[in-house]
Amino acid sequence: MSEPPAPDLGGRLPVALAVPGGDKAALSALGWQSVYRTLAEAPGLAVERVFPDKLGTTEGLDPRTRESNSPLSSFPVIAWSITFEEDFLSLPRTLLAAGVPPLAAERPSLPLVVAGGPVAFLNPAPIAPFVDCFWVGEADDRFLHFFNTLRKLVFDGADREAILDAVKDMDGVYAPGRSKTPVRRITSGGQGPLTDPAFSCFISGRAAFRDTLLLEVNRGCPYGCRFCAAGYIYRPPRHAELDELKRIVELADPPKVGLVGTALTDWPELLPFLKWLHERKKKFSLSSMRADGITEELLVYLRERGIRTITLALEGASERLRRMMSKKLDPKDFLNAVRLCARYGVNHLKIYMIAGWPGETDEDYAELAEFLAEIVRIRSEEPGGRKKQFMRITIGVSSLVPKPFTPFQWAPMQSEDALNARMKSLEKLAKPYKGVTLQHDDPFQARLQGLLARGGEELAEFILRAAEHGGWKKALKLWDGDPAMILDRERGKDEPFPWEVVDIGVRRDYMWKEWERAKAAKVSPGCSARGCGQCAGCGMEPPPEP
């Protein structure tokens, strides 16, 4: 029995926009909402949402769209927004649940499976066998032109092969096995201000961030930390303009605004914007902040507005490790931020760290023990050390996953046993201190993320086995591949990487020099305030004109 067709949409192309993770995760993610807005406003397109759960279903049944309850298989185009490597599993599972062959080679006809999101320009290779074509980069006018081209081809009766041949060399399109590679990442707006800040289309009580308008303040980061993929794949760094953010808030009129960005305290307009929000009786929250951006004026204002939790990123256990990653953080600035938090009544201080650096030693963590003792001492000297205003401290530790398109792409990843041992030693380090809690990730999951982030098309078989046989751990036992070849060795200088089907616009030789400097624990300067056109320190060239 054939599936019922999608509803008659008056000449508009039906597009299903799939976002993994179910309602709670999807409604708290920004990237796909920008895509949804772009497509929904186009007169020739009819976009509908589907939020498949971990099993690829919606409410336990075959995946269907929110707007018309139409089966996913009835849409000629299924567009995926994928942010995290662990979400790779949702792609074949959802297609299987919809009755659509998960492998592109087994789909002789429509639907066309399109994928975008950060993984599309970080490393699309592991899911390339499932995907007909990727959108590589940010969504600008060329993105809409791509979808309008699909609409014309579908309504002209072109078959799948003809459609892919027609779009394979368009700007920003990577059709595996067809496109000329590397495909240059698309950057919307170029240098200068962030002209298209992402913001929530849907403000919901079901979201992880309840009833909150998420608002992108900046994209990219000027500091050039060597482990951070966002600092490389979103170059050049851009800040939104104050008037544009005000306009978005006034249109949405939400009860709460969540500011999203990698370097919020670098934005000169941060405090004026927060005061503007308060004048309009809007609550607000901020993502993690740099310790050197925490001023007394800012912290006092945050506390006056009821902000109880502050998150600071320390990243490395020692000064040597922070130089390795080019963190550019003065320990005195960090301790000063801790003191201000304890002085002005912050209830909960969260400190974010990463463990598992190449060549890290017990001496690095002995330095951390001394630093933590200093943090606790400072707390005891301020009101935050008193019973009624006691400041809890949570240290969150994640395992280093050396990501593509960063200088650490050449680095090996530590073994699961080594990571587990390090996490246990950190738990022991924090245990003596009252009100200090240490939480850490699961090294198995971190190694899985590393495998999915750094592998090539050979991982599609592993992903498919996980989809069909109950998950990642079982798939590892069934898969013939060797994770050690992907994870456990330092890569050679000229060894090709599977992700180099994409060109993010930062030269490989620059990143190799940064890897060499990392091993020597030498700090490099961040982005110049003069902008890319006057700097080119990272070898980044302006993208070609559309």
Image (cartoon, rainbow, N blue to C red):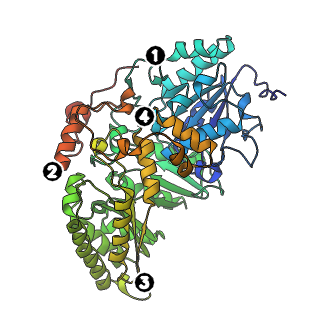
Q: Position of residue 196 (x, y in %)?
A: 46, 37
Q: In terms of secondary structure, where does tag 3 sit?
A: loop
Query: Is residue 33 in view?
Result: no
Residue at 72% across, 30% down: 73
Q: Which residue is mark 1?
A: 169
Q: Which residue is mark 2?
A: 522
Q: Which residue is mark 4?
A: 456
Gap between marks 2 and 4 measured at Cα: 31 Å
For the residue pair 246 and 393, the one nearer the viewer reads as 393
Nearest to the eye among marks 4 and 3: give it: 4
Label 1 or label 2, whichever comes before in sequence order:
1
Gap between marks 2 and 3 measured at Cα: 40 Å
Nearest to the eye among marks 4 and 1: give it: 4
Crowding at mark 1 (Cα within 10 Å: few <14, some 14-19, many 20+)? some
Label 2 or label 3, whichever comes before in sequence order:
3
Nearest to the eye among marks 2 and 4: give it: 4
Gap between marks 1 and 2 measured at Cα: 41 Å
Q: Which residue is mark 3?
A: 389
Q: Position of residue 350 (x, y in %)?
A: 40, 68
Residue at 31% across, 41% down: 409
- Depicted 107 relative to depicted 60: above or below: above
Nearest to the eye among marks 2 and 3: give it: 2
- Amino acid residing under circle 1: Asp
Label 4 or label 3, whichever comes before in sequence order:
3
Q: Is residue 444 left or right of residue 204?
A: left
